[in-house]
Amino acid sequence: MTPDNNSFIAVIDSGVGGISVLCELIDLMPWEHYVYFGDSIHAPYGTKSAKEIRALTLKITKNMLQRGAKAIVVACNTATSAAVRTMRELYPHIPIIGIEPAVKPASMISEHPTVVVMATPATLHLEKFHHLMSAYSDKVDMIPLACPGLVELIEEGKFDGPEIEGYLHALFAPYHEKQIDAVVLGCTHYPHIKAAIAKAVGNQTAICDGGRGTAAETKRRLEAAGLSTDRKKMGYRIIENSAGEEKVSLCMQLLSRHKSSSS
């Protein structure tokens, strides 16, 4: 199908995490149509090989384009690192927007800040993150912090409570004596537990995520391609998940949580 400006934006992720990006997109461009697909049956992507992640992401992308998507937002840091370059080579006529850890805004918190980047093991091992570290090596004392198992907890619908708090306390325990200026949420699942992270590191520490920047870049790319909708009424939002209705319900819950916190 050939997309036009009133086609939908596909937002894809390894599970429920990318709902945090979808919320930012809706806030910025409420008139657009959105189809969200979470691949929870294969979550987490963060423990898979780059080849596996790329194959899963390309399969979902192909399906969305066959359905008429006018743009693809890869709302997953790991999939962005593993697959976006290949996606752009295969589909040069389609705006494809990825997400990366929000190190740039974190770097502006103070003079040479100490910044912890929370991410999946795969994201931290992929070449794209190493380039990011190198680009900011003279501006930031960057501490990569792998978070194995955290995506799984969030996929289970655990956003707060003893299990999440215990996990985060243990995760940050080695840094309790260190002044941390900012924590970068390098996985789109993590904004769903932002309050718990803030509690674990202290409210004086800035929490940065890339969702808003990704939404702004999507808007810019659509405008540049002449693909922004001309509708002046609320677009539709379709939520799909490879693991079925239970995960769809969790995604809807996360959307509602965002609306409540924004109102």
Image: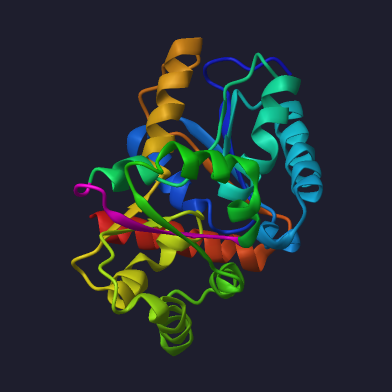
Image-based side of 238 in relation to 263, left or right: right
Answer above or below: position of 179 versus 184.
below
Q: Nearer the viewer, residue 108 or 162?
A: 108
Image-based side of 235 in relation to 245, left or right: left
Determine the residue positioned at 69% across, 38% down.
83
Answer above or below: position of 186 versus 179.
above
Number of numbered discs visible in the structure rendering: 0
Report which quarter residue 172 is drawn in. bottom left
Query: Residue 245: x percent and y percent?
Result: 66, 64
Query: Residue 221: x percent and y percent?
Result: 47, 20
Residue 99: in sight, yes or no? no
- Magenta span of residues: 109-120
Q: Is residue 164 magenta?
A: no
Answer above or below: position of 234 versus 228.
below
Query: Residue 21: x percent and y percent?
Result: 46, 46
Q: Which quadrant: the N terminus?
A: top right
Q: Nearer the viewer, residue 231 or 162?
A: 162
Answer above or below: position of 58 versus 94.
below
**Furthest residue in direction front, as rendered:** 138
Image-based side of 146 in relation to 111, left or right: right
Query: Residue 188: x percent and y percent?
Result: 50, 54
